[in-house]
Image: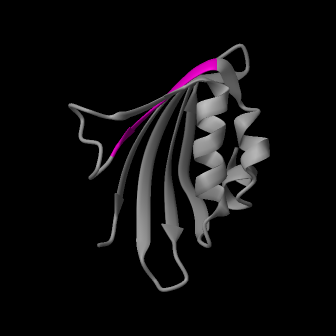
Amino acid sequence: MRRGIEERDAARLVELYAEDAELRLVDLLHPPSNPKILRGREQIGEYLDDVCARDMTHRVERLTTEGDRIAFTENCEYPGGSRVLCLATLHVDGGYIVREVGVQVWDE
């Protein structure tokens, strides 16, 4: 996962998700009462393709695992210096991510 994120490898990342996985994103545009919800490997793959295609660096930090749970922070930076911070928690079942919740904030 770390390698896929830091190398911006959407194809590698999407293979980590179960076919029926759910990704829930909360940010400025999608508040907790109306999060962006992506269902299934296809929708999640389209999102990952978009994120990985952006000219920015990604760095995974504070990665922790406990049983079937994973949590980490992801620090991202665009060439102009604008930054994004994401906090993610994942639930893994059968070796695949079945649920992920991400909270992200970015510089204006």
The residue segment tinted magenta is: 20-26
Residue 54 in picture, x, y percent from top left: 60, 66
Position above or below: 30 against 33: below
Residue 10 in picture, x, y percent from top left: 72, 48
Position above or below: 100 against 76: above
Is residue 68 something that shows in the picture? no
Give me the residue at 73% from left, 20% from top: 95
55 or 63, nearer to the observer? 55
Image quadrant assignment for residue 31: top left
64 or 33, nearer to the observer? 33
Residue 68 in picture, x, y percent from top left: 59, 20
The question of residue 57 being in magenta is answered with: no
Which part of the image, by quadrant, shows the C terminus?
bottom left
Taking the image as shown, residue 104 lies to the left or right of residue 81, namely left
Position above or below: 79 against 9: below
* Predominant secondary structure, magenta span: strand
Residue 43 in picture, x, y percent from top left: 59, 33
The question of residue 22 being in magenta is answered with: yes
Taking the image as shown, residue 62 lies to the left or right of residue 86, namely right
88 or 24, nearer to the observer? 24
Position above or below: 74 against 26: below
Tell me the colour scheme of the image.
one colour
39 or 32, nearer to the observer? 39
Give me the residue at 59% from left, 21% from top: 21
